[in-house]
Image (spheres, rainbow, N blue to C red):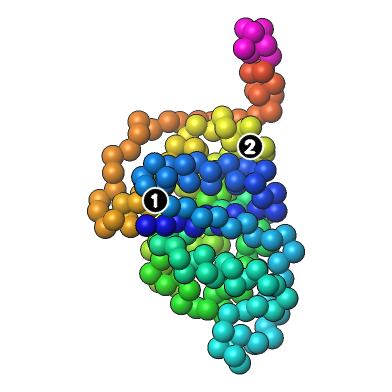
Amino acid sequence: MKALLVNGSPRGAFGCTARALAEVEKELKKLHIDTDSYVVPKDIKHCINCRWCKTRNTFCVHDHQEFGELVDKINGADAIVFGSPVYYGGITSQLKALLTRLLYSGPHTLEDKVVAGVFSSRRAGSTSAMSELNLFFLMHSCRIVGSQYWNEVHGDMPEEVELDAEGLQTMRTLARNIEAMLSNREFPDREHKIHTNFISREYLGLLKHDNELKGE
């Protein structure tokens, strides 16, 4: 079995979304699921309704040579996890452009795939972003996977996400649920649930100060 992790953040490997996806990936590997990754390019073009794909009955390749690479990765995956930071209560424009072009030109691309969305936000807007992303899945016969909470982490920087113990646990549970769905069996037992409130930069500073006093 193989899972593809699609990072829709313009910060790529250096942002909070990447940290969340890394936790999912680490758990998937523990479950002996191969992984692959794809970072949505910052300069990806949006759909201009030129109908190039419809007249040629093929995927959109207009102005973007890497689009074919993504399609190959999706075709080779059994499960796909799409990650996005929350911008104004929605997913990033890059991820939306990708999904709009991908599913307009290839409406069967995600059919019967196990899919999930992962979101990072500083504070709020994640539930509306989830709804926006799930609308793509719900009209393309996808099998959507949830977790013990909404699939989200909180933080304005990866160091803050590191302290969101509940969010990272949610990512691990999501990975185990993905494996269970791919294996057509019941969801596994969960870790003892962690409850984490919002993490602030002020708290990070105090924590760093305490560690320095302890000599850590």
- Nearer mark to the viewer, of 2 and 1: 1
Magenta stretch contains residue 65: no
Give the structural element (helix, strand or loop) at label 2.
Answer: helix
Main secondary structure found in the magenta portion: helix
Residue 139 in view: no
Give the structural element (helix, strand or loop) at label 1.
Answer: loop
Image check: 105 left or right of 97?
Answer: left
Residue type (three-letter) at the residue carrying disc 2: Pro
Residue 43: quadrant of the picture: bottom right
Between residue 61 and residue 90, name the one nearer to us.
61
The single residue placed furthest to the top in the displayed view is 214
Image quarter in which the C terminus is found: top right
In the image, what residue occupies the spot 65% across and 68% down? 66
Q: Earlier in the sequence, mark 2 or mark 1?
A: 1
In the image, what residue occupies the spot 57% across and 67% down? 70
Image check: 17 left or right of 186?
Answer: right
Magenta stretch contains residue 212: yes
Residue type (three-letter) at the residue carrying disc 1: Ile
Eyeballing the image, is 110 above or below 118? below
The single residue placed furthest to the left in the displayed view is 185
Q: Which residues are magenta?
A: 209-216
Circle on res. 196:
none
Residue 160 in view: yes
Mark 1 neighbour density, 10 Å: few (under 14) some (14–19) many (20 or more): some
Mark 2 neighbour density, 10 Å: few (under 14) some (14–19) many (20 or more): some
Between residue 57 and residue 32, name the one nearer to us.
32
Image check: 134 left or right of 142?
Answer: right
Image quarter in which the N terminus is found: bottom left
The residue wearing badge 2 is: 158
Circle on res. 33:
1
Between residue 154 and residue 89, name the one nearer to us.
154
